[in-house]
Image: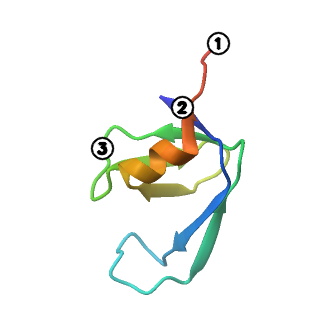
Amino acid sequence: MKFICIESFEIDKYEDEERDDEPIGTMLIEKGSLWEMRDNSGDYDVMLDDCEDARWIGLSKEDFKEAFIRAEEK
């Protein structure tokens, strides 16, 4: 299922998949960007893959609901 970001925001960026590390910076999630939800969210409530590049993000349900809406599929 695909979702569109409706509000730009920044999240911490990490070196690898382990969140125990210190963030190495931030990553901007832009309004209008298209993301696909993963079936398995691992340690996160929601995991999304960027449809335009190899990035992925893990979010809480609350953050996801505030920043994304379902994309209409044609």
- Taking depth in this image into account, of 51 and 73 the one nearest to the observer is 73
- Taking depth in this image into account, of 59 and 24 the one nearest to the observer is 59
* Image mark for residue 40: 3
* Image mark for residue 60: none
Residue shown at 54% from the left, 31% from the top? 2
Q: Is residue 4 above or below residue 16?
A: above
Q: Is residue 11 above or below residue 69?
A: below
Q: Secondary structure at mark 3?
A: loop
**Residue linked to disc 1:** 74
For label 2, count other residues whose C-alpha is less than 10 Å away and answer few (under 14), some (14-19) or many (20+): some
- For marks 2 and 1, give the CA distance: 12 Å
**Residue linked to disc 2:** 2
- Image position, residue 63 (x, y; %): 46, 53
| Quarter location, residue 74 | top right
Q: Earlier in the sequence, mark 1 or mark 3?
A: 3
For label 3, count other residues whose C-alpha is less than 10 Å away and answer few (under 14), some (14-19) or many (20+): few
The amino acid pointed to by label 1 is: Lys
- Image position, residue 24 (x, y; %): 55, 84
The amino acid pointed to by label 2 is: Lys
Residue shown at 42% from the left, 55% from the top? 59
- For marks 3 and 2, give the CA distance: 15 Å
